[in-house]
Amino acid sequence: MTVSNHPNGVFTSMRLMSRLFLALAGLLLLGAGVFVATFDPPPPSAKVEKVIADERFPR
């Protein structure tokens, strides 16, 4: 990227870079939001068995 001798040359290139960065950050956030909204994780497949003592239940 070349910077011209124009007084605003540095600022226009910095403005362009910041706009590109903000656009990329926005697309990244949007993509992450779509991923989280559509992601369907599989349920756990491990079987859990636990013995609970009779004293824990009221009669």
Image (tube, grey):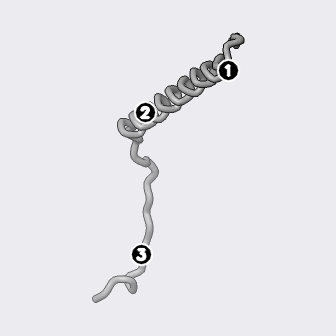
- Distance, label 3 to label 1, CA atoms, is 72 Å
Q: Which quadrant would residue 57 be assigned to in this image?
A: bottom left
What residue is drawn where x is 50% and y is 27%?
23
Q: Which residue is mark 3?
A: 52
The x and y percentages for residue 22 are: 53, 30
Labelled disc at residue 37:
none
In screen coordinates, is 25 left or right of 30? right
50 on left or right of 14: left
Numbered label attached to residue 30: 2
* Callouts 1 and 2 close, C-beta under 8 Å: no
Locate residue 9: give its quadrant: top right
**Furthest-front residue in view?**
7
**Amino acid type at image mark 2:** Leu
Q: Marks 3 and 2, Cα distance to the nearest angstrom?
A: 46 Å
Residue at image mark 1: 10
Taking depth in this image into account, of 26 and 59 the one nearest to the observer is 26
Return the disc, 3 or 1, that comes first in the chain's sequence: 1
Q: Decide: is 42 above or below 23.
A: below
Residue at position x 60%, y 23% in the image: 17
Q: Position of residue 37 (x, y in %)?
A: 36, 39
- Mark 1: amino acid: Val
- The type of residue carrying mark 3 is Ile
Q: Nearer the viewer, mark 1 or mark 2?
A: 1
